[in-house]
Image (cartoon, rainbow, N blue to C red):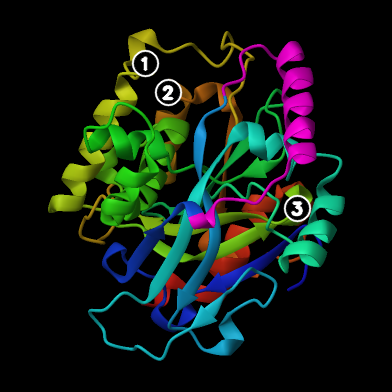
Amino acid sequence: MMDPEVSLLLHCATWRGLRQSHVQVEVSERYNRQTDAALQRHIEEVWTARASKEPWLFDGAKFRLHSFQAALPAAQRSSSFQNGDSTTNRHASAPLLTLRVGLTSYKDYLGTNWSLRAAELRRRGEAELGSSQALLAQPLGVGGVVCTGDGQVVFIRRSQEVAEAGGKLDLPGGHPEPKVVCERLGGAKVDVNLLEKRPEAVVAELFSSICAEVRDEVNIPLSSLGEPLLMGVALNHTSAGRPSAEFYIRYALTCMPSFSHVSLISRTLHIQNERPTSQSSLPSRATCCPEMSYHKCHFCVLSCSLSSDEVRELYWKGGAEANESTDIVFLSRAETLQLDRRSPLWLELCPSAKGAVMLFQTVKPEHS
C-alpha cells in the first residue's frame, strides 16, 4: 500500500517483530546532523519566533537516527535512507538490527524537518553531502500498536492544541529520551560519551519508552503490558521523512520481571520526578492545560487481563499526558489489518499512525 505521507524504512516481517535482545545501537557524534553557519542562524530564527508565541517550549535532547544495519533480505529495506545496509548474520542469539544514532534536539527539528526550508535542505544534503537527511534533525520517535484481550487496537484522538496533526487519530507514542538514559547511568546532563560507553542502556530506553508512553497517554498500568516487539521503522514525509520505530504490544495476564523490567522501573522513577502521576494531582480532560509539549519491560506474552471496556475506563480517569488527546477509539484487529487508502477511516489517521498500521499489516506479529 502506498501513501504519500508515509513510507517504510525497514520492517521485521521475517521474525514477526524483534525483541530487545535482537536490537543494538551504535552511538557516536559522527551520526549527528551536518550544519553550517547559515543553517544555524536559520534554526535560531525559527526557534526565537516560535518561542515568542509559545514560551512553554523546551529544547530537549533527542536521539537522531542516522542509519542502520540489518540482517534483512534486500526486499525488506528501503533505499531512501542514509547508508542502510545488510549483513548475512542469521544466528538466532545475535543482534539482528543495529541502529546508528547521534543526538539532536527539538530546536533543530523545528529549524530543519519542520521548517519551510525542509525541501531545500534535503536537496542541499543530497547534492553537497550525498544524503538528503544529512542536514536534518531526524529525531527518532516511537509508536505502538496496542491490542487488548478482546482483540481491539487502541487509537487516540489527538487534541486540537498539539503542534502536529491536531484532531487526527493516532497511536500511543513519543520519544526515547537521552536525558533519561544519562540520569539512569548517573550523569548530571546529556553526555554523548556516556551514551557511547553504554549502548545497551539506549536500547533499553528505546523499548521501555513505548511502554511508558502507553501508560502516560492511555493510563494502562505497566503490569498489564506485554513485551514490546519492534515491527520496523516508518518515515513521516509531512515532516521531511522523520523516522519512528513502531512496536507491537499485547497485554500480559501474568508477568515475570527481568533486568529489562527493572530498567523500565528506573525510567519511571526519573519521569515521576518531572511530572505528576497520581490520580489526585492530574488535571481532568475538561480542565487540562492547553500548552502541549512536542511530540524492556519483559513480560510473558499471554492473554490479556484487560478488555477494551476496561482500557476505556482507565483512559477516562486520565494519565500523566491526558491533555494530549481527547478521545479513545477501538478498531478490531481484523479491521486494522484491512485498513487501506480506500477506507474512510484512513483519512482520519495521522502519518505516524499510518506508518504503524502499515508495519502491523506487513509484519503480522500476531502470527508469531
Earlier sequence position, callout 3 versus callout 2: 3
Residues under labels 3 and 1: Cα distance?
34 Å
Secondary structure type for disc 2:
loop
Residue in the foreground of this view, choosing between 11 and 55: 55
55 drawn magenta: yes
Secondary structure type for disc 3:
loop
10 Å crowding of disc 2: few (<14), some (14-19), many (20+): many
Residue at 34% x, 35% y is: 180
Question: Marks 3 and 1: which is nearer the front?
Answer: 3
Residue in the foreground of this view, choosing between 267 and 220: 267
Circles 2 and 1 in contact, beta carbons < 8 Å: yes
Quadrant in the picture for residue 149: bottom left
Query: What type is the residue that disc 1 sits on?
Result: Pro
Image position of 324 (left or right of 109)? left
Residue at 39% x, 80% y is: 15
Query: What type is the residue that disc 2 sits on?
Result: Ala
The range drawn in magenta is: 30-58
Confirm whether residue 255 shows in the render. Answer: no
The quarter of the image holding the C terminus is: bottom left
Residue at 22% x, 55% y is: 298
Q: Which mark is residue 320?
A: 2
Residue in the foreground of this view, choosing between 310 and 192: 192
Residue at 84% x, 60% y is: 123
Earlier sequence position, callout 3 versus callout 1: 3
Q: Provide the residue designation for mark 3.
A: 240
Q: Provide the residue designation for mark 1.
A: 276
Circles 3 and 1 in contact, beta carbons < 8 Å: no
Residues under labels 3 and 2: Cα distance?
30 Å
